[in-house]
């Protein structure tokens, strides 16, 4: 692919869908929360829960310790609910869904029509504040797997939601998590019954379309005893001059012998070359390995967003539980990323592994910030951390801020980090064999990221590899 | 905070009214914000406010400098002697050096210590500092023998706080080995020291911080320095034995080819808590920094390492390395590390490593199969673990002395 072609490809998901929207009144207030709750036809306990979070929010302060600073967000100037008008009365089948919406997802490469799907991936498509469609429901139902929008789960499976919602990220956690608890609109709910292996990848595709809105999705995944699920998440947004807020909460619960694999390819609109516009991606992701021998694995490819600020974490409560975190964070132009993970070892013989690759180019700033905390009772625990940073040019920054705590004589923590640039020799070697500069860089970067990319499910891996190349275009030479 | 401190500012000597007024202002400022606690990122792992409040009450400033004891000096190698009593310069003997080449005097003016600070202990120090020493090595002079600063603390210091400030100037192409040797009688007190170091072009400073025996001291020391072209700073921290000790080092590598080494070997036991916090600022190309921090943690001791390497965009070809290792020998002991990198230049070699864990069972097994009993095997491994940091000391006699001191510390614990 020529450089010119790459340039034109900059952000191909930046289009806007012209669709009539139905919004909540502007601003954050009890009224807005009641409005959201009402429109989702939520039971009273859910509304009470939201209001409790809202009351808590009033006393919380926005955190300011992070590296990327951003202008103050006016929370009263945002819409907290926005949905296509056609979605007001929930369509019963795909045929009733507004064709414009279906077309949008087709354009994004996410056909919602089951016949067109090649491989078995069930998709829940979230457009602004509502879930548009969920595919392959029938097939999943047969196995007893619940995969539906969270608003539907609140009505149909209140016991499960009541039991697990907020059990990993409590409503009073921190500012953005609490904000989400108060105003969350939609997201996915997954429940895998005991001893079930989910036969296909589950996937949610988030799309922000309306302007001046914030997207507050909430995802809750529960893997019951002995089950397995692989979940994918993708996201895009139109190109706009304004900054939009995305504050999601994701909670994972793995019970005895269960395994959850959570993969994200985050490609929100990153803003233009001069750093105008783009999404503020302030997300709280946390998983609890509650049961013995449980496992949670996070894989993330972060290429989009003006500011990415998130730390997918694992609380390793169950004995012998395992937490993994694989991350690639690429920042170019004026993008900023402050991301990493927390591994809290509580149970005995717990293991965690962190592989983080940060790439900065242009005037971007990339920070790895992580915590490994081995508690007194976590005997024979192990952690291995590796974070590598790659710098392209001397206008960007790469930072590593690990917190390492060990309170146990039988546990071992190993941490290593390096910062470097692309080796001239490698570039020369590639050039010599007929690759141009861009292709060579893309090849080397892909090699640098290989350990993480290979963790992604097949379909995602291909897309992610392309994304890595595109995100860096124009940064060399 | 009011009841914790009972300070009489009038008892501290001020050379003029302005200084007295400054002291008052600084002290008020300190009281308003109090001792740093764990909400402060810098003090995240060592909550000073908690530690001091738990162990002290009614803290007063010291004005006793009586000294009638004979200090047990080091006989292992020839050296110049400087004696500080309770933080104040008492006497010195620099007879190994040429006349007027090395100067030491009581630090009179605290002017150079006036700078904007986020550190509240700085305000405390400015308010209460009694001075300290001002050491200067002239241009092109390489000191023939090391200087040992015998830092003596008398026995009547219970619930007292000592604040002092020192300045070290190592001029162009000069060389100095400075050993700070703390001798503490059985009293429980607080010391807050600020030290300024300036290492000019081509100069070398070796700085060793050593503790004689176990003591009840609660120490904080802040070292800030700048380095010129092709200069070298080497710091060895071997201060095991204090109840609490935090050493904060902020070095600025201003000019090309300067290098900074910070090495530490600590063997902490019962109720000991030590923190080393460093910030190495690479502001020029081709500079080198190397940090190696080793902790052996016994009983309920706590070791902390917070290190930061900052590389400015123009500081290409920087070579910076941080390594922190901890041997945790008891489940009540803990090790916390925060090795941080902040890098804005692309052609650099920066890395860090950190590991913590128990003693290697296989190594113990190996030694035991060779007929070495468990206790001795443990000791051997600990010694080996700590001795590694002395590789950078070329002077045989000093190295032997330091190894002996460390061995003594290990024997004392085990």
Image: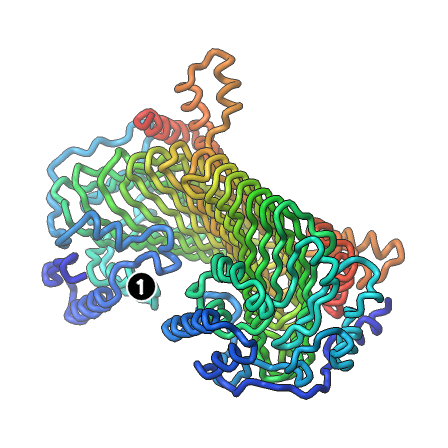
Considering the numbered disc 1 on the image, is that residue within a helix, a strand or a loop?
helix
Please state which of residues B383 and A31 is positioned toward the viewer in this rendering: A31
| Crowd band around label 1 with a 10 angstrom C-alpha radius: few (<14), some (14–19), many (20+) | few
Residue A65 vertical placement versus A321 (above, below): below
Q: Position of residue A238 (x, y in %)?
A: 69, 79
The answer to which quarter of the image holds residue B312 is bottom right
The quadrant the C terminus of chain A occupies is bottom right
Q: Which sits in the foreground, A47 or A318? A: A47
Question: Relative to B315, is B24 on the left or the right?
Answer: left
- The answer to whether one can see residue A126 in this image is yes
Which residue does the image show at 43% across and 43% down from the upper left? A375
Residue B32 in the image, given as x and y percentages of width and height: 23, 68
Structure colour scheme: rainbow
Q: Is residue A442 left or right of residue B369?
A: right
How far from the left and from the top, in percent, is residue A149? 63, 68
Q: Which image quadrant for residue A303? A: bottom right
At 36% across and 60% down in the image, what residue appears? Answer: B40
Of residues A126 and A399, the one nearer the viewer is A126
Looking at the picture, how far across and down is residue A376, in whole percent? 41, 40
Q: Residue furthest top?
A: B371
Quadrant into which the N terminus of chain A falls: bottom right
Q: Chain of mark 1?
A: B
Specify the quadrant of the image occupied by residue B200.
bottom left
Q: Is residue B105 visible?
A: no
Residue that label 1 marks: B112
Q: Residue at x 23, y 43 (%)?
A: B217
Furthest residue in direction right, as rendered: A434
- Residue A133 lies, with reference to residue B266, above or below; the image says below
Residue drawn at x 21%, y 49% as measured from the top left: B54
């Amino acid at each position: 692919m020529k450089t010119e072609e790459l340039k034109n490809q900059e952000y191909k998901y930046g289009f806007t869908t012209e669709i009539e929207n139905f919004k909540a009144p502007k601003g954050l207030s009890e009224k807005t929360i009641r409005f959201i709750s009402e429109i989702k036809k939520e039971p009273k306990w859910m509304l009470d829960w939201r209001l409790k979070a809202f009351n808590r929010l009033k006393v919380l302060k926005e955190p300011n310790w992070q590296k990327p600073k951003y202008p103050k967000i006016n929370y009263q100037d945002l819409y907290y609910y926005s949905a296509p008008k056609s979605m007001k009365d929930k369509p019963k089948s795909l045929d009733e869904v507004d064709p414009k919406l279906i077309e949008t997802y087709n354009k994004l490469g996410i056909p919602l029509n089951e016949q067109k799907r090649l491989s078995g991936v069930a998709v829940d498509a979230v457009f602004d504040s509502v879930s548009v469609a969920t595919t392959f429901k029938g097939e999943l139902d047969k196995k007893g797997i619940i995969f539906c929008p969270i608003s539907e789960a609140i009505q149909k499976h209140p016991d499960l939601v009541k039991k697990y919602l907020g059990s990993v990220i409590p409503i009073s956690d921190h500012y953005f998590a609490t904000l989400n608890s108060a105003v969350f609109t939609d997201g996915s709910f997954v429940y895998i019954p005991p001893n079930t292996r989910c036969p296909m990848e589950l996937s949610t595709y988030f799309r922000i379309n309306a302007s001046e809105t914030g997207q507050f999705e909430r995802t809750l995944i529960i893997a019951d005893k002995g089950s397995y699920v692989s979940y994918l998440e993708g996201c895009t947004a139109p190109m706009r001059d304004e900054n939009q807020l995305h504050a999601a909460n994701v909670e994972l619960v793995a019970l005895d012998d269960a395994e959850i694999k959570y993969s994200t390819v985050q490609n929100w609109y990153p803003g233009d070359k001069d750093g105008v516009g783009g999404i503020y991606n302030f997300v709280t992701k946390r998983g609890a390995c509650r049961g013995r021998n449980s496992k949670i694995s996070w894989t993330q490819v972060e290429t989009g967003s003006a500011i990415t600020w998130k730390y997918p974490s694992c609380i390793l409560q169950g004995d012998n539980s395992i937490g993994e975190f694989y991350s690639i964070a690429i920042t170019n132009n004026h993008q900023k990323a402050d991301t990493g993970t927390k591994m809290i070892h509580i149970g005995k013989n717990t293991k965690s592994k962190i592989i983080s690759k940060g790439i900065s180019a242009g005037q971007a700033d990339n920070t790895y910030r992580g915590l490994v905390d081995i508690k007194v009772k976590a005997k024979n625990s192990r952690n291995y951390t590796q974070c590598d940073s790659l710098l392209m040019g001397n206008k960007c920054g790469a930072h590593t801020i690990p917190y390492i705590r060990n309170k146990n004589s039988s546990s071992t923590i190993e941490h290593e980090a390096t910062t470097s640039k692309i080796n001239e020799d490698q570039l020369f070697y590639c050039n010599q064999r007929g690759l141009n500069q861009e292709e060579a860089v893309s090849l080397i970067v892909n090699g640098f990221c290989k350990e993480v990319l290979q963790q992604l499910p097949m379909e995602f891996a291909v897309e992610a590899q392309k994304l890595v190349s595109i995100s860096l275009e124009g940064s060399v030479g | 905070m009011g009841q914790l401190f009972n300070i009489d500012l009038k008892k501290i000597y001020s050379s003029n009214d302005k200084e007295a007024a400054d002291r008052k202002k600084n002290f008020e400022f300190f009281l308003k914000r109090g001792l740093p606690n764990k909400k402060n990122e810098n003090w995240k792992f060592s909550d000073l406010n908690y530690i001091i409040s738990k162990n002290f009450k009614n803290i007063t400033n010291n004005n006793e400098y009586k000294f009638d004891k004979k200090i047990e000096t080091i006989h292992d190698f020839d050296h110049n002697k400087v004696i500080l009593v309770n933080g104040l310069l008492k006497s010195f003997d620099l007879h190994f050096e040429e006349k007027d080449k090395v100067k030491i005097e009581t630090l009179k003016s605290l002017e150079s210590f006036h700078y904007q600070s986020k550190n509240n202990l700085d305000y405390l120090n400015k308010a209460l500092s009694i001075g300290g020493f001002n050491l200067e090595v002239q241009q092109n002079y390489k000191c023939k023998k090391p200087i040992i600063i015998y830092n003596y603390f008398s026995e009547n210091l219970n619930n007292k706080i000592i604040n002092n400030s020192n300045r070290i100037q190592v001029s162009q192409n000069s060389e100095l080995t400075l050993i700070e040797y703390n001798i503490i009688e059985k009293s429980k007190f607080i010391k807050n020291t600020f030290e300024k170091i300036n290492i000019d072009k081509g100069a070398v400073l070796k700085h060793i911080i050593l503790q004689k025996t176990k003591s009840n001291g609660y120490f904080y020391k802040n070292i800030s320095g700048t380095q010129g072209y092709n200069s070298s700073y080497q710091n060895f921290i071997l201060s095991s034995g204090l109840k609490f000790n935090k050493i904060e080092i902020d070095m600025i590598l201003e000019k090309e080819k300067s290098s900074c080494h910070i090495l530490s070997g600590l063997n902490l036991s019962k109720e000991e808590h030590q923190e080393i916090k460093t910030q190495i600022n690479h502001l020029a190309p081709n500079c080198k920094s190397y940090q190696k921090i080793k902790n052996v943690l016994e009983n309920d001791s706590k070791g902390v390492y917070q290190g930061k390497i900052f590389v400015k965009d123009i500081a290409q070809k920087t070579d910076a390395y941080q390594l922190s290792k901890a041997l945790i020998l008891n489940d009540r002991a803990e090790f916390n590390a925060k090795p941080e990198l902040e890098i804005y230049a692309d052609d650099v070699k920066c890395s860090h490593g950190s590991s913590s864990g128990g003693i290697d069972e296989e190594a113990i097994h190996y030694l035991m199969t060779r007929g070495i009993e468990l206790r001795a095997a443990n000791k051997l491994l600990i010694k080996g673990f700590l001795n590694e940091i002395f590789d950078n000391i070329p002077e045989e006699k000093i190295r032997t002395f330091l190894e002996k001191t460390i061995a003594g510390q290990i024997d004392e614990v085990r």
